[in-house]
Image: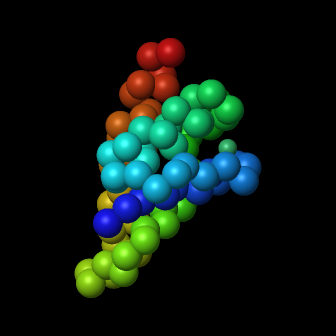
Amino acid sequence: MAYRIWCGECSHRTSWLRESEAEQAHIDHYVAEHPRLAPGGRIETNEKSPEGGTGCFLVLAVLMLLLVLPATCQR
Ligand SMILES: [Zn+2]
């Protein structure tokens, strides 16, 4: 499974990466381009997930927020 995350603010998207790498690339993009915003956008996968993507996406979005917000506040 490969992941690509689309920016919620502009037309940027990460390249196809492993999940953790795509998340980091997405966060790096936000830090560089949208430093005052919490990362948003959507995750695209290159294989169909048998468990459905929506729930997985929501979990990932929450996890990303939990990971990013403390780091953003410290900067
Ligand atoms: Zn962007």
Residue 27 lies, in percent from the top left, at 49, 37
Is any part of residue 62 visible from this angle? no
**Which is more toward the observer, 7 or 40?**
7
At x 59%, y 56%, the residue is: 6
Is any part of residue 17 visible from this angle? yes
Residue 10 lies, in percent from the top left, at 73, 49
At x 26%, y 81%, the residue is: 51
Indicate left or right for 15 with 54 as reference.
right
Ligand 1 is in which quadrant of the figure? top right
User: Which quarter of the figure has residue 68?
Assistant: top left
Height in image: 24 above or below 41? Answer: above
At x 67%, y 49%, the residue is: 12
Figure disc tally:
0
Q: How is the image coloured?
A: rainbow
**Which is more toward the observer, 25 or 75?**
25
Q: Residue furthest right?
A: 10
Residue 2 lies, in percent from the top left, at 37, 62
Q: Looking at the rendering, in which quadrant would you find the N terminus?
A: bottom left
Height in image: 58 above or below 63? Answer: below
At x 43%, y 68%, the residue is: 45
**Which is more toward the observer, 16 or 48?**
16
Q: Residue furthest front?
A: 16
User: Which quarter of the figure has residue 47?
Assistant: bottom left
Q: Residue furthest left?
A: 51
Height in image: 53 above or below 39? Answer: below
